[in-house]
């Protein structure tokens, strides 16, 4: 399938929407991470997303339990998500949103490695160069061209934990391409979230017994609702759609745009200003996206 076809033009637009939502998750997650234990935060986030999505899935497709083979596939797909989001919330207790967004820029390169291991697809030299330039460009934007600031960034327990989460998240896109068997995308998304909720229930049981819910502020619930609907349900759906249309590495490369969206969001809401020293990083990211997306003009659906 040619990536310049009208249908894939829409998919690329949806990937930009996905990046904008992902970019918003780091500051929101930072604001609410101390409101509840991380396993409870992620559990409620997943359950709420599943409940919101269930009517649409059942009305459109009817209620059908997955076959044993598909259940195993959905279980495998849920593991990277559960680990990533738990590591994110737990890590944000010990580190900053800046550090986590910096570490998150490693996901495209990690994904490319998993694509080789899981999908047996080699990364071309042009795409490898694009991944390198994209990482450098994203780091330039995050640190506003301050090389000393990047070199002096001290990694802590939270950073190491989030890095583990990114190692798991890098496997998600390749696993989608490997395990997808043609079912409606919303069905796949729903059952992955449901099984992820089951994993998280096991993790959250001790905290559920001791949590004093009256002590939780309304801001925490609002934050969880936002993350559940916009940065869980919608992004999962878009991520899976994009992976099947464009391939794992191309979709992962969109995370290079995350810092640009963060800077733009801060400028729009008045919490930051435009700085000219960001432009080299922006140009590097745009060059990287061009290299990654033009290194393979044909994408074959599973």
Image (cartoon, rainbow, N blue to C red):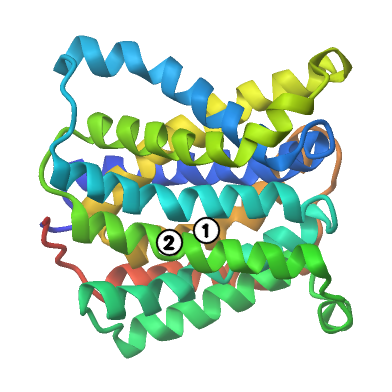
Query: Where residue 145 sits in the image (x, y, percent)?
Result: 79, 74
Q: Is residue 241 left or right of residue 138?
A: left
Task: Note whether 123 is above or below 139 in the view shown.
Answer: below
Do the residues under discs 1 and 2 have CB atoms within 8 angstroms?
yes
Residue sitting at 33 percent across and 53 percent down? 76
The answer for how far apart the CA atoms under marks 1 and 2 are is 6 Å
Looking at the image, residue 40 lies above or below residue 293: above
- The residue labelled by disc 2 is 252
The C terminus: image quadrant: bottom left
Q: Could you tell me if residue 278 is visible in this image?
A: no
On the image, the x and y values in percent for residue 250 come to 35, 63
Instruction: List x then y, in percent, for residue 90.
Output: 74, 51
In the image shown, does 48 or 103 lie closer to the viewer?
Answer: 48
Residue 161, picture quadrant: bottom right
Q: Nearer the viewer, residue 109 or 16?
A: 109
Which numbered dot is residue 255?
1
Q: Alpha-carbon neighbours of circle 1 within 10 Å: few (<14), some, or many (≥20)?
A: many
Total marks shown come to 2
Q: Residue visible at 79% across and 25% down?
A: 211
Q: Which element is circle 2 on?
A: helix
Front in this rendered view, residue 250 or 196: 196
Q: Nearer the viewer, residue 164 or 102?
A: 164
Q: Horizontal and vertical percent for residue 143? A: 80, 69
> Is residue 290 visible from the viewing direction of this image?
yes
Farthest-out residue, bottom: 125
Residue ID at (54%, 54%): 83
Mark 2 residue crowding within 10 angstroms, few (<14) / some (14–19) / many (20+): many
Label 1: element kind: helix
Classify the position of the N terminus by image quarter. Answer: bottom left
């Amino acid at each position: 399938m040619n990536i310049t076809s009208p249908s894939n033009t829409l998919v690329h637009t949806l990937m930009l929407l996905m990046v904008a939502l992902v970019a918003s998750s780091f500051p929101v997650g930072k604001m609410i991470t101390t409101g509840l234990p991380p396993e409870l935060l992620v559990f409620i986030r997943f359950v709420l997303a599943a409940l919101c999505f269930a009517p649409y899935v059942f009305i459109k497709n009817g209620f059908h339990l997955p076959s044993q083979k598909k259940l195993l596939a959905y279980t495998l797909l849920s593991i990277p998500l559960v680990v990533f989001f738990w590591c994110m919330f737990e890590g944000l207790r010990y580190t900053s949103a800046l550090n986590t967004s910096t570490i998150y820029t490693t996901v495209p390169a990690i994904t490319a490695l998993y694509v080789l291991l899981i999908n047996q697809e080699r990364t071309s030299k042009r795409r490898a160069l694009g991944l390198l330039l994209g990482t450098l460009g994203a780091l330039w934007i995050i640190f506003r061209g301050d090389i000393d600031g990047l070199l002096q960034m001290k990694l802590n327990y939270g950073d190491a934990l989030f890095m583990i989460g990114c190692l798991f998240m890098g496997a998600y896109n390749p696993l989608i391409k490997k395990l997808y068997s043609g079912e409606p995308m919303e069905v796949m998304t729903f059952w992955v979230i449901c099984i992820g909720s089951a994993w998280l229930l096991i993790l959250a049981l001790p905290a559920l017994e001791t949590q004093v819910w009256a002590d939780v502020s309304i801001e925490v619930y609002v934050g969880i609702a936002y993350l559940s609907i916009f940065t869980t349900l919608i992004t999962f759906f878009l991520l899976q759609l994009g992976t099947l249309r464009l391939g794992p590495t191309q979709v992962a490369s969109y995370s290079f745009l995350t810092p640009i969206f963060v800077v733009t969001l801060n400028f729009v809401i008045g919490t930051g200003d435009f700085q000219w020293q960001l432009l080299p990083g922006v140009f590097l990211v745009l060059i990287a996206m061009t290299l990654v997306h033009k290194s393979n003009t044909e994408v074959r659906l599973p």
